[in-house]
Image (cartoon, rainbow, N blue to C red):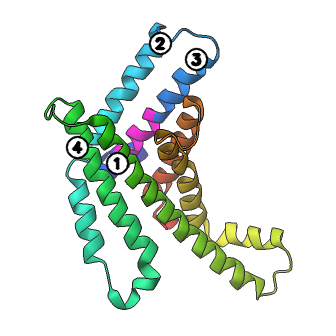
Amino acid sequence: MDIIIKLNSQTVGKDKIARLFQYSCRALWATKIANHASPTNDSVQLLKHIESILSSFRKLLRFGKGFEVLYGAVASIELKHISQQLFIVLGKLSSGLFLLADHVVWLSRSGVSKSVNTTKWLNRSNRFWLISILMNLCRDLQELYRLFVYYSRSNIRNLQQALSVIYQENKPLLVDTVKNVCDVFIPLNGLGYVAVSNQTIGMLGAISSIMGLLPLLYPRLKF
């Protein structure tokens, strides 16, 4: 119960919990359909409805955050260290633009702005989200490469031992990498670049949500 209260007291915690249940619902209704349940089945329709409610709730919860993320990204730029911060800054800028596009999608779907082309803005949202995830993955891979180079110069003799040391000493990096690898398939699927089943998307989204919750529960895992 203490964990639930701790997460629920933070906006980001509410978002991550809602995201976990949102993608879990998608995985469940897709599994039911894969097991020959009718798409019009009551339980399938209920799970889809819950997923839609949670998606709308998260969009409302994040409303306005796009401006905050963009401002924070611009304010954090230090020109003398820009080469070291490039992936971080580009990731934050893309994340901010993704959220702004997501705000427009929410305004359209909620009926506040009926003149908006929802499909076009949803594609823009997915593109900026994809760029943001790719920048974060580049940052993860850059750090993993740096660690491999470092450990290859030490007394570690083989790849298995190097991976074991990286796992033991760099768990925040591995948590972040798993999260981003799972996340990247969601906008790729949304944009039509890859074809992934709803069941797989649901499971990947649930796993990435758990990875996102871990640093909130255990700050030492924050990368």
Callout 3 secondary element: helix
**Residue 138, percent across and down?**
54, 68
Q: Secondary structure at mark 1?
A: helix
Question: CB atoms at circles 3 and 2 under 8 Å apart?
Answer: yes
10 Å neighbourhood of mark 3: few (<14), some, or many (≥20)? some
Query: How far is disc 1 from disc 3 in space, using C-alphas?
Result: 31 Å
Residue bearing mark 3: 32
**What's the residue type where badge 1 is placed?**
Arg
Is residue 53 placed above or below 6 in the rendered structure? above
Q: Residues within 10 Å of mark 1 (few under 14, many from 20)?
A: some
Q: Residues within 10 Å of mark 4 (few under 14, many from 20)?
A: many
SS class, disc 2: helix
Q: Earlier in the sequence, mark 3 or mark 2?
A: 3
Question: Mark 4 = which residue?
Answer: 104
Q: Nearer the viewer, mark 1 or mark 3?
A: 1
Residue in front for this viewpoint, 209 or 86: 86
Q: Quadrant of the N terminus?
A: top left
Give the extent of the magenta segment. 15-22
